[in-house]
Image (cartoon, rainbow, N blue to C red):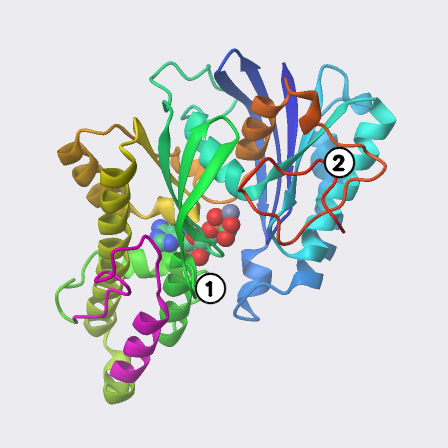
Amino acid sequence: MRILGIESSCDETALALVMRAGDRLLVESSTVLSQVKIHAAYGGVVPEVAARKHMEALFPMLEHTLPRGGAGIDAIAVTAGPGLAPALRTGVEVAKTLAWLWHKSLIPVNHLEGHIYASWLPEGTPPTQPLTGALPTFPALCLLVSGGHTELIFMKDHGVYERLGETLDDAAGEAFDKTAKMLGLPYPGGPQIAARAETGNKDAFDFPRGLLDRPDLNFSFSGLKTSVLYMLRKHDADLEESAFIADVAASVQEAIVDVLVKKTVRAAKRVAPKSVILAGGVSANKALRKRLAEAMHAAGIPLYVPPFAYSVDNAAMIAAAGAFRFDDATDHADPLTLAADPNLEIIGRPSPTPPS
Ligand code: KG4
Ligand code: ZN
């Protein structure tokens, strides 16, 4: 089957065409239009601006991606939540309209589930061949780390999730973004911190590892943020020094990665998964990939990470998650009533018609 994916939950407008045969996927096309430069001026994403930019982009991008009339596609998958309400609504309304006009199945996808399914996508520039390597096996333990979420999720089967732990305050991506801002680095801060960290000393500053001393699987990154803030107040003049910024960046990255990896190892000991899946925008972080790979190698559990192109927001991952929901008619939504849900939870099967 062939499925169109639409993603508009935050500041990336994305469309993709994905083919599924059995449990193998290939990407025919994947386009992402980033609004990062527009929002950088505000230091973060402005929801109404994001929505307007999505509307401007979606139709020209569709024209480019699909034949008119949607010939050759079986379904449309769209991010229904979580995300910024005005931004989500643009993608959802476009998907509903196309599904209704073209008589195609409409499949609402949870954005976080999309991130997890990025590990089912093949590497390489589209059009790709189907993925030939091993696929994640169940039960799988997912470390989901994005700009808005940090969760450990136990995935028992396709679409069946149990949350083992989550952040009590900031998400890991937010911790990267906020500390980058304090260092005077532009939004989004994650890639900036990662780049500066390459030449820095990760042991230069001993920043707090939130909740590491507690046996549960929850996270907290607000203490790290405060600690960086207080430290910087004492080192105002050093902010001009690129070596100082590199040391802070390396130490911040180390504190975040350390907690993420240690809590994932702890969760793996508890639930004994057959595979571990790293998902979400922070999965683009090379230090995290390396440390987690070493830890999982030591634990003897195969680790799956998404291709870099599908680590951060994209529509191929939304199409991928939708493709695995296509066979179950109860996962199809009514194009007249589907509503975006900014707080959509990944636990349980997403309702085809979430409350508005
Ligand atoms: O999943 P995503 O693209 O959007 C959300 O669903 O939130 O994640 C974006 C987050 C941002 O906080 C960004 O700073 C972070 O992922 N990020 C990174 C890296 N690339 C993106 N964090 C650390 N290192 C990176 N290389
Ligand atoms: Zn995301």
Q: Secondary structure at mark 1?
A: loop
**Residue 137, how many percent across, how many down?**
36, 22
Q: Residue 5 vs residue 156: left or right?
A: right
Amino acid at the residue labelled 1:
Tyr
Nearer to us in this view, 174 or 32: 174
Above-or-below relation of 26 to 236? above
Residue 225: image x %, image y %?
A: 34, 73
Residue at screen point 26% across, 39% down? 268
Identified by mark 2, the residue type is Ala
* Residue 236 highlighted magenta (yes or no): no
Residue density around tag 1, few if under 14, some if 14–19, many if 20 or more, within 10 Å? many
The percent position of residue 349, horizontal first and vertical second, equals: 59, 35
The magenta segment: 206-232
Q: Is residue 218 located in the magenta-colored stretch of the structure?
A: yes
- Front position among marks 2 and 1: 2
- Whether residue 178 appears in this view of the structure is yes
- Give the quarter of the image for residue 7: top right
Mark 1 C-beta to ligand 1 under 8 Å = yes
Q: Circle 2 is placed at which residue position?
A: 95
Q: Is residue 51 left or right of residue 191?
A: right
User: How far apart are the two marked residues, 2 and 1, measured between alpha carbons?
Assistant: 29 Å
Residue linked to disc 1: 187
The answer to which quarter of the image holds residue 353 is top right
Of marks 2 and 1, which one's residue comes earlier in the chain?
2
Q: Do the residues bearing badges 2 and 1 touch, measured as CB atoms within 8 Å? A: no
Picture quarter with the N terminus = top right
User: Which residue appears at 48% of the width and 39% of the height?
Assistant: 115
* Residue 65 in sight: no
Relative placement, left or right, of 303 versus 12 is left
